[in-house]
Amino acid sequence: MDGRTAWGAESRAAVEAVAASVAVLAAFTRDAGSSETTDPLRDLADECLDGLTEVARLEARTAALKARLAADYAHAARALAPPATSPQESTAHELALIAEVACVLTVSERTAGAFLSDCQALTTGLPLALEALQSGTISWQHARIIIDETSALGPAATAALEAHFLDPEAPNPARGCPAGDLVPSRFRTKARTWRERHHPVSIEERHTQKAADRRVEYLPDRDGMAWLSAYLPAATAAGIWERSTAAARTLQGPHETRTLAQLRADITATWLLTNTGSATVDGGLPDGGTGLSGTVAGGMEPGLAGRVPSPRAQVLITVPVLSLLGATDEPAVLDGYGPIPPSMARALVAEGAESFHRVLTDPRDGAPLEIGSTSYRLTKAQRQWLRLRDGKCPFPGCNNHSLDNEADHLLAWAHGGTTGITNLGQPCPKHHRLKHRTAWTPTPAGKNSPPGWTSPSHRHYPSEHQDWEPPHWPHHLQVTGEPCPRLLAARQRPLRPGLPVEVPAVLCEPGALVQGLGAGVRGHHQ
C-alpha cells in the first residue's frame, strides 16, 4: 500500500508541474505584444521565439508525465491481476495490460508495448534522464535515445553513459552544448560513440559477431522505384560513400542538371552494373575496370570478410597510438562514422590504403595538435585537421560530412583574420551561404572546438563538440622516464596484441612523440 501511495503522489506532483507550466504559458501568450517599445515587431518576434521555447519545455514535461502515468498504471495493473498459474496465463495478463494502454492512447498494441517498455526503463533505471525530461531540458526523443543506447548495457555502464551527458560533475563530462541542445540525430551519434568506447564487451568481439551478418538487401518501393542497401564493415561502407561522393562532385558544373544525390546514385549504379570482373575465391572483387585498387580486410579475417578493394577517397582515421601498437583495444575513429575496432584501423594502416589518412592523437588528452599558417590558402594538413576537429558542418543540427564542406575564415582575411585553426570553420555550402548572405554569424572557434553561431535575433547556439578522451594506459605497460627515442625502439620490435612493451612516459613534446613512432604512422601523414 505504501508503494502505491508513493506512485500516486509522484504522479500527482507531475500533473501539478505540467499544470503550472500550462498556466505560465497561458499568461505569457496573454501578455505577448502588450509591451510598449520603439520596435514592437522585434518584440513580437522575440516573444514568439520565447513562446516556442516554453512550448518545447512543456512538451518534454508532458512526455515525462505520460511516461510516469504509463509506468504507474503497469505497476498497478500487475498488482491487481490475480496470480498467474502458468506461463500462458502470465502472457495473457501482459497482453491485456498492453491492450488497455493501446486503446486509451489510440495506438497499435505493438506501439503500446514498446512505449510501456520505454517507460519502464526510464522510470526504473534512468533517474537522471527522467529528471531532465521532467525539467524540460531534454525532449522525449533525447530520452528515447538514452533508453536505446543503454538497453544492452549493465547498470554500471548505463549509469556512466547517463551521467556523461546529463551530470556536469561527472568525470570527463560531454563537451560543448548540453544534450538537450543537440538535435536528436546528432545526440544519438554522440551517445552511440560513447557507448562504443565504454561498452563492457570489446568492440572487437561485437564487430566479429556482427560482421557475419553482412548482406545486401532489396526492397521494392512505389512509383517504379526500389531501395538497395548494404550492411558492411564500417571502413568499407565509409570508403564507398566518400568515393562516390567525390566522383559525383567532379561531375557537377554549370551544364550538369543532376543533384549531388542523383549523381551519387547514378555513379554507384554504373559501378555495380558495368563491373566485368568476377568474384575471387575468397569473396573479394578484382579491379575489373572500376578504378579500385588495393585490398583491405576491413578489420576481419579473410575467411570471414574476404578481401574488399579499398576505394580512392579521402577518409580520416584517428588512431590512439597504443591501440595502433597493439597494446590496447581502444577503438579508432572513422571520419563520418564513429568508433571502429582497432584491428580494422591497424589493417588500414598496415596495408597502406591510399584512401585513409592516418592521424595520431595527443597522448595526454586524446586531441590533435594546433596547426597555423601565415598564408591565405589552407594547407592540405589544415583541411584534414578541420575535418578531424569538427567532424561535420559546425552549424547546429547539420549532418553534412566534412568531405562536402568548404573551409572558411571566421574573421575575413581582408579584415585581419588569420589562417590559423582557431579562425577557421568548414560550413557546408548551404550554411556557408547563410553566413555571407544573412545576419547569421559564426563565433570564434578553439583548437579543439568548432565555432558556434549567433542568429539575427542575437541568440547564441553552440556547436557540437567531439568528446576527445585521454588514451587508456594499460597497467601491463611499464612506464619509464626515458626520452622519446626509447619509443622508437619499442616501435621497431614485433608488435602483437597483449605483448608487454616498455614505453617511455610522455615527458616530451607531443610532436616529438609522434615523430618517434616512425613515418608509417606519423600524424597527418598521407
Image (tube, rainbow, N blue to C red):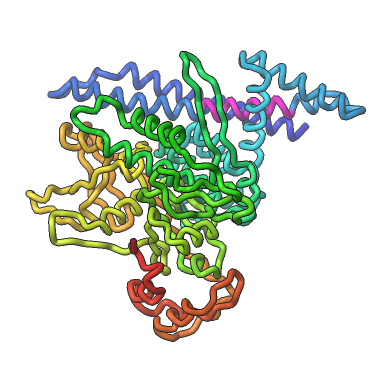
Q: Quadrant of residue 246?
A: top left
Question: What residue sits 28% from the left and 24% below the top?
Answer: 47
Q: Main secondary structure of the magenta part?
A: helix
Query: Quick check: 216 above or below 227?
Result: below
Query: Quick check: 257 above or below 299?
Result: above
Q: How many marks?
A: 0
Residue 218 at x, y = what percent?
56, 27
Residue 129 at x, y = what percent?
54, 40
Q: Dividing the image into 4 quarters, which one contains the N terminus? A: top right
Q: Quadrant of residue 127?
A: top right
Q: Quadrant of residue 122?
A: top right
Q: Dividing the image into 4 quarters, which one contains the C terminus? A: bottom left
Query: Quick check: 49 above or below 108?
Result: below
Question: What residue sits 64% from the left and 17% below the top?
Answer: 108
| Front-lying residue, 86 or 295 | 295
Q: Is residue 305 visible?
A: no
Look at the image and give the residue range highlighted in magenta: 62-75
Question: What residue sits 39% from the left and 30% below the top?
Answer: 265
